[in-house]
Image (spheres, rainbow, N blue to C red):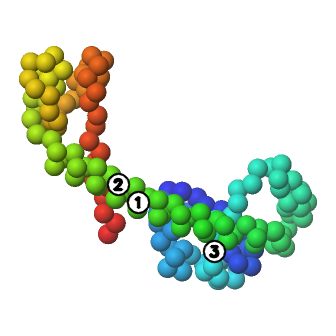
Amino acid sequence: MIKYALICEADHEFESWFPDSASYDKQVKRGLVACPLCDSVKVSKAIMAPNVARKDQDRAIAADNDDVPTPTPAAAASAPQVQDIALLDEQQQQLRGMIRELHEKIVANTDDVGENFPEEARKMHDGETPARSIRGKASFEEARELLEDGIPVLPIPDLPEERN
Ligand SMILES: [Zn+2]
């Protein structure tokens, strides 16, 4: 669970819990997150500014410690916040595509030697068998030993989970 400080279009600040950041994105896009004060669904993450930047603000909240909502100057900042989220989404999708592509390339261009991987890798490294690209299974310990012996093995990236 993640707690986000949120702000609506009318500058009401409130907090809400989400299972993860992707759920936050989805729920906000679908208009499922509403401001508790005005029911607006145009909400975004409030800037978690360091104390220095919001000293006046902090003082104001501390001083009039009553039910009057303190107006906040975060409206200008809310637009770039939303853009940040959209960019991250796009990057993640690109990254997922790249990982899938890499995974497929590795699988297509390597011989699967299964459990024999550490042995086969060592044989090739020692020149006992001609060099080729192989994939297979190795324990963390076996992979570490290969790397320590200067054999450049690398983990095959896991396929990213498809959304929905
Ligand atoms: Zn509101």
Q: Reading the chain from its start, which is encountered first: label 3 or label 2?
A: 3
Above or below, comparing residue 132 to residue 148 in the picture: below
Q: Position of residue 95 (x, y in %)?
A: 40, 55
Identified at 50% across, 56% down, the residue is: 1
Tell me if I can see residue 17 in this picture. yes
- Dot 2 alpha-carbon crowd within 10 angstroms: few under 14, some 14 to 19, many 20 or more: few
- Count the numbered circles shown: 3
Residue at which label 2 appears: 98
Q: Position of residue 92 (x, y in %)?
A: 44, 58
Residue at which label 1 appears: 94
**Amino acid residing under circle 2:** Met
**Amino acid residing under circle 3:** Val
Farthest residue to the front: give it: 130
The answer to whether the residues at label 2 and label 1 have Cβ atoms under 8 Å apart is: yes
- Dot 1 alpha-carbon crowd within 10 angstroms: few under 14, some 14 to 19, many 20 or more: few
Asked whether mark 3 and ligand 1 are closer than 8 Å, the reply comes as yes
Identified at 81% across, 68% down, the residue is: 73
